[in-house]
Image (cartoon, rainbow, N blue to C red):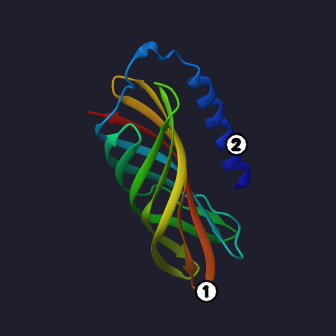
Amino acid sequence: MKRTILMTAAVLAMLGVAAAHADERYGRYPYGEGLYVGVGAGQLIYKEDGLDTMRPTIIEARIGQQINRYFALEGRVGGGISRDEVNGASTSAQLLFGAYAKGILPLSPMFSAYGIAGIAGTQLHHNYPDFNTTDTGFSYGVGGELKVGGGTSLTLEWARVNDGNNAGYYYTADHVVFGVNWRF
């Protein structure tokens, strides 16, 4: 997991450095204030004491309001489209939801890095024993957004969605999501 985070951060940093050298004569940063919607897909990285890491596939929808170049508010909802099984234990994401404040660092007219912080929740289904766990708490993450034209942008994000207690065992649930946003 640390290796994935470091590799993601390195790729985002390289993209940011390259984009920071872009010609500033393009004028106002594109895709400023306003409403946006998006979708994303990726993996929920579930680690529980005593078990190997499981990675069920997830999708999410998001809606946000960018207040200015540096700040947005965002809501998300999603769920799992597949489960993952390791050594007979399986986990799937039944429901993911969150409300975030998003701090944006424009590095060029076409690329920005961002951080999110807010409240998120997960409802996970486990087969050991067969039951659901639902936890809500503080969530945070980092990402990058690349504007590709016509109000469309691509995002790549890592976030600590939740941590909690599953029948006495501590767990963390992170996500790595690739997404597309559309601005109006």
Mark 2 nearby-residue class (10 Å; few <14, some 14–19, many ≥20) = few
Mark 1 nearby-residue class (10 Å; few <14, some 14–19, many ≥20) = few
Q: Residue at x 42, y 65 (%)?
A: 119
Left/right placement of residue 84 relative to residue 37 reads right
* x and y percentages locating residue 146 in the rendered image: 49, 30
Residue 7's disc is 2
Q: Mark 2 against mark 1, which lies toward the viewer?
A: 2
Q: Residue at x 53, y 44 (%)?
A: 143
* x and y percentages locating residue 31 in the rendered image: 35, 30
Q: Amino acid at mark 1?
A: Gly
Q: Quadrant of the C terminus?
A: top left
- Marks 2/1: CA–CA distance: 32 Å
Quadrant location of residue 10?
Answer: top right
Compared to residue 112, the image places residue 143 above or below, namely below
Q: Is residue 35 visible?
A: yes
* x and y percentages locating residue 29 in the rendered image: 40, 26
Q: Residue at x 57, y 25 (%)?
A: 20
Q: Amino acid at mark 2?
A: Met
* SS state under label 1: loop
Residue 168's disc is 1
Compared to residue 14, the image places residue 161 above or below, namely below
